[in-house]
Each structure stands twice: as structure tokens, then as C-alpha cells.
Image (cartoon, rainbow, N blue to C red):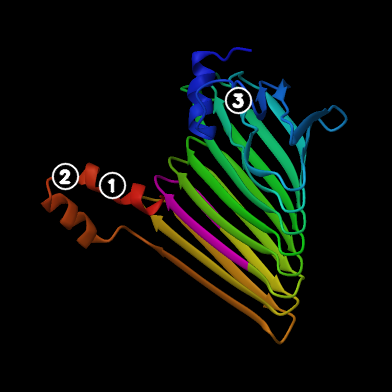
């Protein structure tokens, strides 16, 4: 199993990998082919031809293991829909590294739509990292539409790190979360758009369990003539706590719409939301330029720190 130099470049960007792993659990999808995969003693990855995807099962009690499931597209005009299902067994503590990289040097659209369904069982912990990156000098669009359906059972924890690095022409990120008793989710989203790119992020969390907690943090930078929309919803049906924070830097002729919403259906639900949209502070620019950076370098430094 060999990756081309271009594929190695993409997989490093989206999954912090340098090549095909020599051991452990992984599934690398290349131009619609998902046959490059391997299981480990505690993690089973099986193909699901009926739904064009994989089933990942993590044994109860599994600790400190990582699953890699990147998607690489270097073929012009390839569009696919992939369905993946994950079961994180009781008391497990694992990291799942996903991400998709597209290189499109042609004039036809390349698109990856991934539907991921997760069940985090009782007392289990999961960190899920999903990064998107696109490149290529062609006029063909690079499109990602990820959908995440997540159930966190009693006293489980799900931590989501959702990152759009650059180069994505259009994306719709749709995340649905159900929290049971004592369950917790922490979702951190970072997004960069430029030129005429469009991005929409929808997060909908239902806190159905007692003492469930939710933290949603979204940070974005919109440049050029790009457009971003954030629809962040949180509903509390029991004694629960939740916080939404949405911060955006807007530049050039870009547009940003932030719609944080909280809904309480229980007297002991404690829900907070806040949103801020603004330009780069001039005092930050002045300070960095006084230290020897030019305007472009100072701007890049501020944006990198904001999206970190």
C-alpha cells in the first residue's frame, strides 16, 4: 500500500500523518476506494458495501488508542457520499482522527459528503478530530458536506475538533447531538474562508439527560467576498448547563451571519449564548508592526493566533 507524494501532502494536512501506518487501526479512503484499512486487537474496522462506508467498533475498556480514517481525493470530478458508523464501548478512551483533503486541478467539481454516526457508550470518552483542506489550480469546485449524528450515553464525554483550514469552495457542516444523564460535549470549530467561498455550520444539541453539559465554541475568519453562516442551537429538557460562544473576524467584503439560540424546557436548565463579529483591532496591528513586522505579517500573526 503506497501513497503518492500528492496524497502524502494531503494526508499530512488533514490527519497529521506522513504515510500509511505500519500498525494500529486505520482506514484510508482514496478516490472512492475504501479498501486500504486495518484493525487492531481492540478496534475493528469493517467495510459496509451496502452504505458505501465503514463500521468501527471499539471494545469496552480500550484506552489511549487512536483510529485514523482520512479521505483523499485527487481525481477531478469525483463526487461521493459515504456512511460511517462508530461504536465507542463502555469505559473506553480513544481518539478518532478523520479529515478530508481534495486536490482538484481540473474544471469539474470534486465533492465528498460524509455521514458519520457515533454512539459513545456509558462512561466512555471520545475525541474526534475532523479537518478539511483543499487545493488545486483548476476551476473545478472543491466541496465538503459533513453530517455528524452523535449520541452520548450516561456519563460519556465527546470532544469535537472541527477545522476548515483553507481552499474549500463550499461546505455545509451539520451536527446533531443527543446527551443523556451526565453526558458532556465540548465542540470547538475553527473556520477560514476566502475569495467567494461559502460555509454554513449547523449545530443542534439536545440535552435530554439530567446533569448533562454542553460547550460550543466557534471561531472563524472571513476574507475576500466569502460568506459564513453559523446556526448554533442548544435545547435543555432537564437540569443541565450549556454555553455557546461564537466569535468571527470579518475582512474585505465578506459576510458573516451568526445565529446562536438557546431553548429551555426545564426550570433548572442553565443556558448562555454570546456572539461577536468584528474586524482586526488596530491596536494589535500597531503593536506587532512596532516589533518589526510589516502589515501582511502582522495580520497573518493575528489570524493564526485567533484560529489556534
Left or right: residue 253 compared with residue 198: left
Which quadrant: the N terminus? Answer: top right
Of the residues under marks 2 and 3, which one precedes in the sequence?
Answer: 3
Q: Earlier in the sequence, mark 2 or mark 1?
A: 2
Q: Which residue is more in the foreground, 201 or 272?
A: 272
Q: Nearer the viewer, residue 172 or 146?
A: 146
Q: Give the SS element for disc 3.
A: strand
Q: Give how far apart the Cα atoms at labels 1 and 3 are.
A: 29 Å
Looking at this view, is 264 or 186 the one in front? 186
**Residue at label 2?**
293
Residue found at the very far right of the displayed protein: 50
Secondary structure, magenta segment, majority class = strand
Residue visible at 12% across and 46% down? 292
Q: Relative to residue 100, is residue 90 depicted above or below?
A: below
Callout 2 secondary element = loop
Q: Residue furthest bottom?
A: 267
Q: Nearer the viewer, residue 292 or 56?
A: 56
Which residue is tagged 1?
301
C-alpha gap between disc 2 and disc 1 = 9 Å
Q: Position of residue 36 (x, y in %)?
A: 70, 20
What span is colored magenta in the figure?
Answer: 214-229
Q: Are marks 1 and 3 in contact (CB under 8 Å)?
A: no
Determine contact: label 2, label 1, CB under 8 Å.
yes
For the point 69% across and 64% down, which residue is it? 205
Q: Is residue 303 magenta?
A: no
Of callouts 1 and 3, the N-terminal one? 3
Q: Is residue 170 visible?
A: yes
State whether residue 169 appears in this view.
Answer: no
Tell me: residue 115, above or below residue 206.
above
Amino acid at each position: 500500500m503506497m501513497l503518492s507524494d500528492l496524497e502524502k501532502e494531503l494526508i499530512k494536512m488533514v490527519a497529521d500523518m506522513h504515510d500509511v501506518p505500519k500498525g494500529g487501526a486505520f482506514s484510508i479512503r482514496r478516490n472512492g476506494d475504501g479498501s486500504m484499512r486495518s484493525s487492531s486487537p481492540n478496534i475493528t474496522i469493517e467495510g459496509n458495501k451496502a452504505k458505501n462506508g465503514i463500521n468501527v467498533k471499539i471494545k469496552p475498556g480500550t484506552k489511549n488508542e487512536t483510529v485514523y480514517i482520512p479521505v483523499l481525493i485527487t481525481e477531478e470530478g469525483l463526487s461521493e457520499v459515504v456512511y460511517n458508523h462508530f461504536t465507542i464501548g463502555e469505559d473506553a478512551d480513544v481518539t478518532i482522527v478523520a479529515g478530508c483533503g481534495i486536490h482538484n486541478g481540473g474544471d469539474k467539481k470534486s465533492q465528498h459528503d460524509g455521514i458519520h454516526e457515533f454512539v459513545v457508550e456509558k462512561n466512555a470518552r471520545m475525541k474526534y478530530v475532523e479537518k478539511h483542506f483543499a487545493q488545486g489550480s483548476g476551476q473545478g469546485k472543491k466541496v465538503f458536506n459533513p453530517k455528524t449524528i452523535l449520541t452520548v450515553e450516561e456519563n460519556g464525554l465527546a470532544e469535537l475538533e472541527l477545522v476548515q483550514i483553507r481552499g474549500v469552495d463550499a461546505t455545509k457542516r451539520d451536527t446533531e447531538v443527543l446527551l443523556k444523564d451526565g453526558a458532556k460535549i465540548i465542540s470547538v470549530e475553527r473556520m477560514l474562508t476566502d475569495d467567494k467561498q461559502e460555509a454554513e455550520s449547523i449545530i443542534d444539541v439536545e440535552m435530554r439527560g439530567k446533569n448533562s453539559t454542553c460547550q460550543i465554541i466557534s471561531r472563524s475568519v472571513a476574507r475576500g467576498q466569502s460568506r459564513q453562516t453559523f446556526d448554533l442551537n442548544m435545547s435543555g429538557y432537564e437540569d443541565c448547563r450549556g454555553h455557546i460562544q461564537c466569535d468571527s473576524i470579518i475582512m474585505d467584503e465578506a459576510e458573516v451571519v451568526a445565529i446562536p439560540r438557546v431553548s429551555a424546557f426545564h426550570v433548572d436548565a442553565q443556558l448562555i449564548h454570546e456572539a461577536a463579529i468584528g474586524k482586526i483591532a488596530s491596536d494589535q496591528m500597531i503593536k506587532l508592526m512596532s516589533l518589526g513586522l510589516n502589515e501582511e505579517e502582522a495580520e497573518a500573526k493575528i489570524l493564526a493566533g485567533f484560529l489556534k
